[in-house]
Image (cartoon, grey):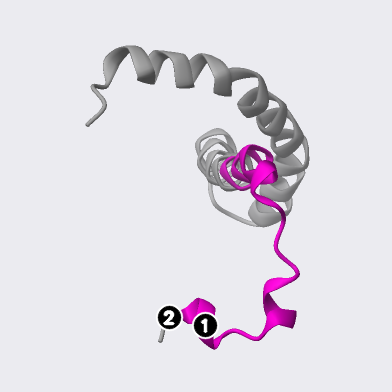
Amino acid sequence: MSDLELASPASRNWKLPARAMPVAFAFFMSGIMAFLMSLVITAANRGIGEGYLHAVLGAYSLAMPVAFVCVMLVRPVVLRLVSLTVRLP
């Protein structure tokens, strides 16, 4: 049995429709990347010490919305570049 068959109908209802996939992808990609970059850049600029996590979260609060908008704007360009450089099976 697949996981889909084992899941109750109620547990599947929380999912977004397929048409939301580009936005969901951009949200998760930008969130993860912004957090990782905030960790690295904060450590490079001020080191890892007292107040490091607070500084990371402050940087992340700015970086996440900027990254989300950037991913949404750049996505069509990247898709086009990939289609120009990758041969379809």
As drawn, is 82 to the left or to the right of 71? left
Q: Which residue is mark 1?
A: 5
Looking at the rendering, which quadrant does residue 69 occupy?
A: top right
Crowding around mark 2 (Cα neighbors within 10 Å: few <14, some 14 to 19, many 20+) is: few
Report whether 37 appears left or right of 65: left
Q: Secondary structure at mark 2?
A: loop
Where does the image place residue 8, in percent across and percent down from the top left?
65, 86
Per the rendered image, the range of residues in magenta is: 3-29
- Residues at marks 1 and 2 touching, judged by CB atoms closer than 8 Å: yes
Q: Position of residue 6 (x, y in %)?
A: 53, 87
Residue at point 69% right, 81% down? Answer: 9
Q: Looking at the picture, does residue 10 appear above or below residue 68?
A: below
Residue type at mark 1 is: Glu
Q: Residue at x 62, y 44 (%)?
A: 21
Q: Is residue 64 above or below residue 82?
A: below
Under tag 1, what secondary structure?
A: helix
- Quadrant where the N terminus sits is bottom left
Q: Name the main secondary structure of what is drawn in magenta.
A: helix
How crowded pointer 1 is (Cα within 10 Å; few <14, some 14-19, many 20+) is rated as few
Q: Please, what is the three-letter code of the amino acid marked with disc 2?
A: Ser
Q: Residue 49 shows which numbered tag?
A: none
Confirm whether the magenta stretch covers residue 62.
no
Whether residue 7 is situated above or below residue 66 in the rendered picture? below
Residue at 54% over, 38% down:
37
Report whether 26 appears left or right of 44: right
Q: Which residue is mark 2?
A: 2
**Distance between the alpha carbons at the discs numbered 1 and 2:** 5 Å
Q: Residue at x 66, y 56 (%)?
A: 53
Residue closer to the observer: 71 or 49: 71
